Image (cartoon, helix red, strand yellow):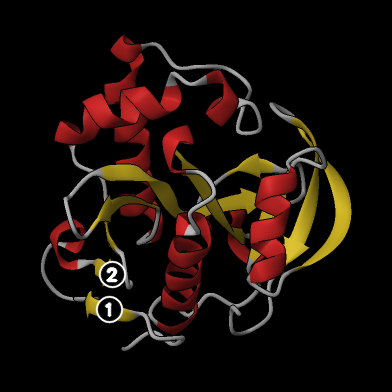
């Protein structure tokens, strides 16, 4: 099913191997699920304290990166959605990630659709390598992923959970048409504002 706002799905294949069939494309970016060979690029992203400041607060050692990718792949297996890797179309450079996580708002911990059941709350999140900040990649990717989640995965309520001090991500949410709601406490990351997205991302 095609995405809106000028983004297009290359394939959303409900049959066959999920991880090789899900591909999205925007004007400047190709989006795909992660693979183990992404470890070096992911390590660079997760080792930057400024990148990690608002997404857990701790840098990830290079030796732990394969386990991070395994967790991302486990989210895809459990939820049929998860983090996409963002590659520039013109040179294939990996610039960050953007995707859907699932939270259980009863205790605001990450969960799965099956475990959280009727309480499951999908979240649209993003993280870009610092050298690629300020170029609009986060907004471009999040719009594509959010509209894909709506159309292909039939996600209803969609939020972005953003630390109050994270002004850059708050501006991305605003550009997507989201509105700030309640402030919640994340057990591993402190207070965060729940930004609620409209049915179609701006």
C-alpha gap between disc 1 and disc 2: 5 Å
Residue 202: mark in rendering: none
Q: Earlier in the sequence, mark 1 or mark 2?
A: 1
Compare residues 114 and 46 and report the one nearer the observer: 46
Residue 9: mark in rendering: 1
Q: Position of residue 10 (x, y in %)?
A: 20, 77
Q: Position of residue 120 (x, y in %)?
A: 62, 60
Mark 2 element type: strand
Is residue 36 placed above or below 99 in the rendered structure? above
Is residue 58 placed above or below 51 in the rendered structure? above
Mark 1 element type: strand
**Structural crowding at the residue carrying mark 2, measured as other residues with C-alpha within 10 Å and reported as few (<14), some (14–19) or many (≥20):** many
**Structural crowding at the residue carrying mark 1, measured as other residues with C-alpha within 10 Å and reported as few (<14), some (14–19) or many (≥20):** many
Question: Total of numbered circles in the picture?
Answer: 2
Compare residues 155 and 118 and report the one nearer the observer: 155
* Left or right placement of residue 188 versus residue 126 in this view: right
Q: Position of residue 186 (x, y in %)?
A: 75, 35
Compare residues 21 and 24 and report the one nearer the observer: 24
* Left or right placement of residue 123 versus residue 68 in this view: right
* Left or right placement of residue 132 versus residue 22 in this view: right
User: Mark 1–mark 2 contact, CB under 8 Å?
Assistant: yes
Q: Position of residue 109 (x, y in %)?
A: 66, 39
Q: Which residue in the structure is indicated by mark 2?
A: 24
The residue depicted at 46 percent of the width and 66 percent of the height is 140
The residue depicted at 53 percent of the width and 63 percent of the height is 139
Question: Splitting the image into 4 quarters, where does residue 54 fall?
Answer: top right
Question: Splitting the image into 4 quarters, where does residue 13 fall?
Answer: bottom left
Q: Quadrant of the N terminus?
A: bottom left
Q: Quadrant of the C terminus?
A: bottom right
């Amino acid at each position: 099913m095609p995405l809106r706002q000028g983004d297009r799905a290359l394939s959303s294949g409900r049959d066959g191997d999920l991880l090789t069939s899900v591909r999205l494309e925007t004007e400047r970016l190709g989006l795909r699920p992660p693979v183990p060979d992404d470890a070096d690029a992911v390590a660079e992203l997760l080792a930057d304290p400024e990148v990690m400041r608002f997404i857990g607060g701790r840098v990830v050692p290079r030796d732990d990166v394969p386990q991070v990718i395994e967790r991302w792949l486990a989210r895809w297996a459990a939820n049929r959605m998860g983090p996409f890797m963002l590659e520039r179309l013109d040179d294939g450079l990996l610039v960050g990630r953007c995707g859907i996580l699932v939270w259980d708002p009863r205790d605001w911990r990450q969960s799965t659709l099956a475990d959280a059941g009727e309480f499951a709350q999908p979240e649209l999140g993003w993280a870009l390598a610092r050298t690629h900040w300020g170029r609009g990649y986060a907004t471009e990717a999040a719009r594509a992923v959010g509209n894909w989640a709506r159309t292909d995965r039939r996600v209803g309520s969609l939020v972005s959970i953003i630390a109050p001090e994270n002004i850059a991500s708050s501006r991305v949410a605003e550009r997507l048409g989201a509105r700030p709601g309640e402030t919640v406490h994340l057990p591993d990351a402190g207070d965060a504002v729940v930004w609620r997205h409209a049915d179609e991302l701006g």
